[in-house]
Amino acid sequence: MSNDQEQEKTNANTIESLEEDSPVLGESSSSLQDELAGKTEECKALNDKYLRLAAEFENYKRLTQRDQREQIRFGNEQLLKELLPVVDNMERAIKSARTNGGDSALIQGVELTLKQLSGILAKFGVQAIETTGQDFDPSAHQAVSYGPSNDVPANKVLDEFQKGYRLHDRILRAAMVSVSSGPAHFSEHDSTTN
């Protein structure tokens, strides 16, 4: 055997004899084991706390990224809302000029400008809301009037007073519409007077 191996064997024998001869060293060993078990539990608790904190941080990052995407997607919403009355006025001007027999070159110019403006709005995700003949949808339509109609079934849009617009999946402006209450019902009083 080498000197190092002999030295290790001697040290191991010495430790064993000390543990057998000294009850204090045995007690010290059990208290060390208790302390080690306590530190192990503390380490597990800290690791659990770290994992929860890491999960919370991941959730925070995900929410922040979603908010950032929403801000980019709808950041120009206020500007687009401000442009809608311009579109309305251009449509009214074209309609009025046609009914009053206005200058066709002027009408054509306004139509081209309206077409260009509508194209720009569409490029940024603005679409007109379909109304006439559609089911009344309180999230997209604002009912201005409610009346009977023999041609249009109940809860369908009769007429559109002002166009509504949607920005992606969000309502930019609700459409102002009149809604059908269905066919007019005659009362007994109406039938006796006829």
Image (cartoon, rainbow, N blue to C red):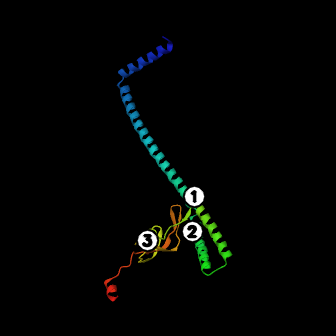
Q: Residue furthest front?
A: 194
Location of residue 64 with respect to 117 vertically, above or below: above
Location of residue 20 with respect to 85 vertically, above or below: above
User: Where is residue 64 drawn, in percent x and y?
Assistant: 52, 54
User: Where is residue 179 drawn, in percent x and y?
Assistant: 44, 74
Residue under the point 50% across and 71% down: 175
Q: Secondary structure at mark 2?
A: helix
Displayed quadrant of residue 118: bottom right
Specify whether 78 is left or right of 43. Answer: right
Specify whether 191 is left or right of 14. Answer: left
User: For the residue marked with disc 1, what is the amino acid?
Assistant: Ile
Where is mark 2, residue-wise? 81
Where is mark 3, residue-wise? 156
Specify whether 15 is left or right of 71. Answer: left
Specify whether 191 is left or right of 141. Answer: left
Q: Which mark is residue 14?
A: none
Displayed quadrant of residue 16: top left
Q: Count the labels in the image.
A: 3
Distance between the alpha carbons at the discs numbered 2 and 1? 16 Å
Give the class, few, some or many, for how many residues have Cα within 10 Å of label 1's Cα (few <14, many ≥20): few
Where is mark 1, residue-wise? 72
User: For the residue marked with disc 3, what is the amino acid?
Assistant: Lys
Q: Secondary structure at mark 1?
A: helix
User: Where is residue 74 drawn, in percent x and y?
Assistant: 55, 61
User: Where is residue 188 drawn, in percent x and y?
Assistant: 31, 84
Location of residue 41 with respect to 77 vertically, above or below: above
